[in-house]
Image (cartoon, rainbow, N blue to C red):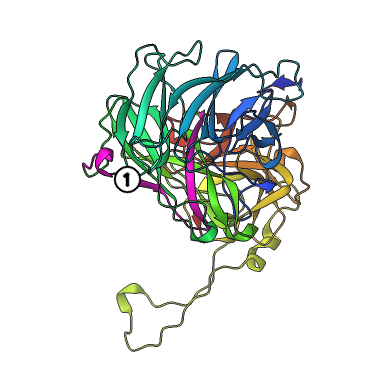
Amino acid sequence: MSSRSIFPLLFFSIATIDVAAQTGAPYIHDPSNIAECDGKYYTFGTGGGGLISDDGWTWHGGAERPGGGAAPDVLHIGDHYLFIYGATGGGLGGGHNGRILTMWNRSLDPKSPDFEFTSPIEVASSDGLEDCDAIDPCLLLDPTTGRLWSTYGTYFGNIRLIELDPHTGERIRGNKERDIAIDCEATYLVYRDGWYYLLGTHGTCCDGVNSTYNIVVGRSRSVTGPYIDNIGRDMMQGGGRMVISAGDHVCGPGHFGRTVIDEGVEVMSCHYEADFDQGGRSVLGLRPLLWKNGWPMAGDRFHGGNYEILSERRGYALELAVDFVRMPQERQAWWNIDSNESVHPISLQQLSDVIGTWPQGDIAVRCGDYMMRPHQHWSIVPLPEAGGYLGGPYFKIVIQDTERALAATADLELTTVPAFTGAPEQLWCIQQLTDGTFRLLPKAIPGYEGINTHYVLYSAGDSTPTLAEWDFKSDNAKWNLKKM
């Protein structure tokens, strides 16, 4: 088969797993939203530096941003990147005398000939006495109007909203700041389905494993507010619905960011004030972003283990296409049961009971009603050494207690091979969707160029799994992973 390009770049993909959230050196505080430039991923933090990743899984230092200060954000507008950050403020240096600055660059790569920051422009400030602290800004380019907005502020007073010029990064002449929230900091604006969402970081920071940071949200039909939570509380009165808090060996999530990967596939970024598995360091956090009844919430880390893989379309289970092996049993006829007779539990069918009946070579897969049988039980194992994508490593998917591995074929079908070899068509990207289900993509398809971001595990009809183009509107493309 001739080579055909799917996509040259693995765009943002996410699955969270039962290993460290990221590998390499993902240490950062107050990270910006994740940005992409020339096939690499960037995030910028307090102090002027930031992180770079070639694949979204392994992170290292090297991102550069002049000006120091705190809590930057970055937004790709046209062929430029707009940066916004707080100079002092937040009790740093000049106390609560803060300044919000913007600047531009054509590239995020310090080695690029286009890497040159413009001089910073002040767009907001605070004098240390007023009811605001100019720090922790964010950027939103409204997709409905093309207008550019920024929020900023901390617990020292109100969260404020200002409008900027998307062509220059300057404050719109005559624009008056608006107070839109209290009792939070490190805010972030999202527009989705007719709603504006204001996400704020609540709680205490900078105290390691004792930090109580968490992220809350309110929403409004207007970017100027009022922002109301799910039980009717205004964020100007301290309201906010929980999005993410401590758990899974990390605490203190703050500084929300959002990336839309594909229709129905989104990821949230943040930092954790302390990762218990990494000595309590502040690290980059990436989680699936779910939307439930119109509200954002962090998805759970996906932990490797033993799973049923169930089609969302009808609930049928992915299984080997092998003969059904009946289990022996002694039983009384249902119409003649002796209630005084002893009951003897029946053990589940074991792999050793049936594996001798399976073919030795490749075995096809199908979908069938789940019967708790070995040919329906899958082990999903993270492979951090095989690389990954934004937020997770690739996985191998094998029949439990074997190395028989699920693999893509050159004709866009599926098979299982007798032994896992680590070939790209045997590596799987697992992404939780905004509705809580999952999509599964092979890293590569034989005969196709590049990393696959297009074809997913798909249930054609009731019993035929295949590979097909991603379609969030179709339940055939969605799967549920039920831990056994």
Residue 148 shows in the view: yes
Q: Is residue 238 magenta?
A: yes
Task: Give percent across and percent down for residue 240.
Answer: 31, 44
Q: Magenta span covers which residues?
A: 232-261
Report the side of 274 relative to 334 (left or right). right
Local crowd at mark 1 within 10 Å, few (<14), some, or many (≥20)? many
The residue shown at (28%, 44%) is 238
Position of the N terminus, as image quadrant, is: top right
In the picture of the structure, the residue carrying the numbered disc 1 is 241
Q: Is residue 436 left or right of residue 87?
A: left
**Vertical side of 53 occupied by 320: above or below:** below
Q: Is residue 421 left or right of residue 42?
A: right
Q: Work out whether residue 249 can be spotted.
A: no
Image position, residue 121 (x, y; %): 53, 18
Amino acid type, mark 1: Arg
Q: Nearer the viewer, residue 331 or 209?
A: 209
In the rendered view, tell whether residue 241 sits above or below residue 275: above
User: Residue sitting at 28 percent across and 24 percent down?
Assistant: 222
Which quadrant would residue 298 be assigned to in this image? Answer: top left
Location of residue 287 in the rendering, given as x and y in whole percent from the top left corner: 52, 44
Instruction: Out of 388 and 287, give the one closest to the viewer.
Output: 287
Q: Secondary structure at mark 1?
A: strand
Q: Position of residue 79 (x, y in %)?
A: 60, 13
Q: How many marks?
A: 1
The residue sitting at 48% across, 52% down in the picture is 252
Asked if residue 233 is among those painted magenta in the image, a careful observer would answer yes
